[in-house]
Image (tube, grey):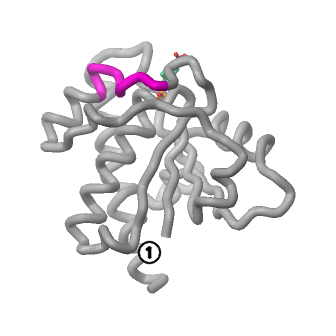
């Protein structure tokens, strides 16, 4: 089972989701079964670590995302991953526009797994520190939901 989180820049929301979900997977004892990665729609930050504010917010919850490096979404991802989970509708549109005709990935807004079908994780890039906390709250809820979903699916 391979899960890919997608946001715009891959320096705030999706690397946070990667770190939070990876910990949830480890705590559920599923680390050998589930592979986690993240990427961005754009390539402006490719090769860069997560935003300092995202790193700090994650660190406050005991999660180290400092080693992650941004990369852009690529066509091979649609064949390599089982779940491609965007943070907002803009990401969802861009992913669908790029998707090859035949691919096996399930594409859905990440917050659907928090029981919020139309929910978006808001871009915290231009806001303050509180925005990063709110993003982590949403991501934690959706990560738990996704773990339970995968467990239920067997
Ligand atoms: P992210 O946040 O999509 O959560 O990584 C952003 C980071 C950078 C930019 C936009 C969103 N940017 O325009 O550079």
At 30% from the left edge and 64% from the top edge, which residue is drawn? 25
**In x, y percent, where is residue 69?**
40, 32
Residue drawn at x 27%, y 61% is: 24
Q: Residues within 10 Å of mark 1 (few under 14, many from 20)?
A: few
Based on the picture, tell me whether residue 125 belongs to the magenta stretch: no
Q: Nearer the viewer, residue 75 or 23?
A: 75
**Callout count:** 1
Q: Position of residue 39 (x, y in %)?
A: 52, 39
Whole-percent x, y for residue 8 in the image: 56, 29
* 32 with respect to 120 (left or right): left
Instruction: Identify the residue position indicated by label 1 in the image.
Output: 150
Look at the image and give the residue range highlighted in magenta.
Answer: 47-54
- Give the answer, above or below, for where 50 lies relative to 1: above
- Among the 4 quarters of the image, the one containing residue 125: top left
Q: Residue at x 44, y 74 (%)?
A: 150
With 148 as the anchor, is 87 left or right in this view?
right
Q: Quadrant of the C terminus?
A: bottom left
Q: Please provide percent x and percent y for residue 29.
A: 24, 74
Whether 77 is drawn above or below 105: the answer is above
Q: Is the CB of mark 1 within 8 Å of ligand 1?
A: no
């Amino acid at each position: 089972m391979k899960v890919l989180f997608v946001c715009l820049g891959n320096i705030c929301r999706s690397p946070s989701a990667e770190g939070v979900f990876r910990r949830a997977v480890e705590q559920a004892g599923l680390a050998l079964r589930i592979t986690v990665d993240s990427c961005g729609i754009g390539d402006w930050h490719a090769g860069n670590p997560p935003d300092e504010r995202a790193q700090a917010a994650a660190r406050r919850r005991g999660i180290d995302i400092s080693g992650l490096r941004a990369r852009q979404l690529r066509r091979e991802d649609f064949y390599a991953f089982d779940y491609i989970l965007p943070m907002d509708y803009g990401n969802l549109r861009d992913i669908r526009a790029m998707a090859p005709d035949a691919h096996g990935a399930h594409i859905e807004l990440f917050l659907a797994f928090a029981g919020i079908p139309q929910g978006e994780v808001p871009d915290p890039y231009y806001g303050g520190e509180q925005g990063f906390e709110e993003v982590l709250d949403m991501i934690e809820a959706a990560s738990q939901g996704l773990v339970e979903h995968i467990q239920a699916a067997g």
